[in-house]
Image (tube, grey):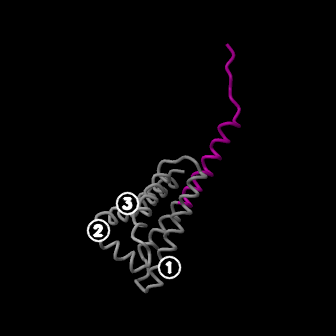
């Protein structure tokens, strides 16, 4: 369980750094990002919506204990990156290597999260099914 948790934390840390960098880049290099969004055919107001959604999704992945909401966050990030890759490929603006890196980090995080959930269910079942010894005085 310790190695699974280590892999999970490493993958989540790399993914978090990538998302934080992307959001910070959108705010600090706003004019360049507006130009890139225009080239991709997206309106510039989506920059703030996308940044807020990414921060909300990242907060959900890091702090939420609900598996249901985490699944939606994973799905939202996956769709975001896939559509980003498609948009870049459509205008022949590279291959979207950063999005591919993020998809890989997201996938590793997802798989390790699933393993951690399964392992915690197994250990919680073991705790509840073990007989307890009572001392009689």
Q: Main secondary structure of the magenta part?
A: helix
Residue of label 1: 86
Could you say where residue 16 lies in the image, as x and y percent from the top left? 41, 59
Residue corresponding to mark 3: 20
Residue 88 picture quarter:
bottom left
Alpha carbon of mark 1 to alpha carbon of mark 2: how far? 23 Å
Give the class, few, some or many, for how many residues have Cα within 10 Å of label 1's Cα (few <14, many ≥20): few
Residue 77 rendering spot, x and y as whole percentages: 51, 64
Residue at left offset 44%, top offset 64%: 50
Q: Closer to the camera: disc 2 or disc 3?
A: 2
Based on the displayed image, in which of its 4 quarters is residue 51 positioned? Answer: bottom left
- The 10 Å Cα crowd at callout 2, few under 14, some 14 to 19, many 20 or more, is few
The percent coordinates of residue 11 (x first, y second) are 46, 60
Secondary structure found at label 2 = loop
Q: Between marks 3 and 1, how big is the CA–CA gap? A: 22 Å
Q: Mark 2 near mark 3, Cβ–Cβ under 8 Å? A: no
Magenta segment: 110-137
Q: Indicate the secondary structure of the residue bearing disc 3.
A: helix
- Please provide percent x and percent y for residue 10: 43, 58
* In this view, the mark in front (3 or 1): 1
| SS for dot 1 | helix
Q: Earlier in the sequence, mark 2 or mark 3?
A: 3
Crowd band around label 3 with a 10 angstrom C-alpha radius: few (<14), some (14–19), many (20+): some
Q: Which of marks 3 and 1 is nearer the N terminus?
A: 3
The mark that comes first in sequence, 1 or 2, is 2
User: Which image quarter holds the C terminus?
Assistant: top right
Residue that mark 2 sits on: 29
């Amino acid at each position: 369980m310790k190695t699974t948790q280590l892999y999970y934390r490493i993958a989540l840390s790399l993914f978090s750094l990538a998302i934080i960098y992307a959001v910070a880049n959108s705010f600090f290099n706003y004019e360049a990002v507006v130009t890139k969004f225009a080239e991709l055919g997206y309106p510039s107001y989506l920059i703030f919506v996308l940044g807020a959604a990414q921060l909300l999704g990242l907060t959900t992945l890091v702090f939420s204990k609900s598996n249901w909401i985490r699944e939606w966050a994973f799905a939202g990030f996956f769709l975001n990156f896939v559509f980003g890759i498609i948009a870049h490929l459509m205008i022949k603006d590279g291959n979207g290597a950063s999005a591919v890196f993020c998809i890989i980090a997201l996938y590793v995080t997802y798989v390790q999260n699933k393993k951690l959930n399964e392992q915690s269910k197994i250990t919680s079942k073991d705790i509840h099914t073990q007989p307890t010894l009572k001392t009689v005085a």
